Amino acid sequence: MGKINGSVKDEMLEKKNWAVVGVSPNEDKFGFKVFDTLKNHKYIVYGVNPKYDEVRGEKIYNELETILDKVECINFVVNPKITYNMMEKLDPSQIKYLWFQPGAYDDKVLELGESKGFNMVHGSCVLVELGKR
């Protein structure tokens, strides 16, 4: 069984290799803000969005599976249906930490994550948490 919230937040924020699913070149969108803020806090961040090849000169990946480096945490900034579909393919022995931005999850997403044993954070914004550091 995975863990939800609580100490998972602190564990995740200690990890340095993140993927942001739903990155956007639009600076007003949360996908951009999360990507940019993680980078500004010295995290290694891989953006994932099939609509874009790059954001601010950074390579953007079509899907998680094309990232060759080890990703420790995934931050989802997409519709819950997209989150769910991506999670179905994920193996918690490879990537065990998932952070769902507000609006990126629903009960089905949380049930799937729990049944697969992921460590998850939801109902909390990574931007707010990093702002406290």
Image (cartoon, rainbow, N blue to C red):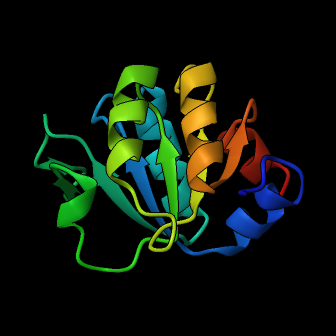
Task: Specify whether 115 is left or right of 18.
Answer: right
Placement of 69 over or under 131, stated as above or below: below
In the image, taking residue 64 as reference, residue 11 lies left or right, namely: right
- In this view, the residue farthest toward the right is 6
- Which quadrant, please, contains the C terminus? bottom right
Q: Is residue 106 visible?
A: no
Q: Residue at x 72, y 73 (%)?
A: 14
Q: Quadrant of residue 50?
A: top left
Name the residue nearer the viewer: 111 or 58: 111
The image shows residue 89 at horizontal and vertical percentages of 32, 51
Residue 131 appears at what percent x and percent y?
A: 77, 48
Q: Is residue 35 left or right of residue 50?
A: right
| Vertical placement of residue 33 versus 94, above or below | above
Q: Quadrant of the N terminus?
A: bottom right
Is residue 9 at all visible to an observer of this figure? yes
| Residue 109 position in % (x across, y down) | 54, 30
The residue shown at (13%, 34%) is: 51
Identify the residue shown where x is 48% and y is 67%: 95
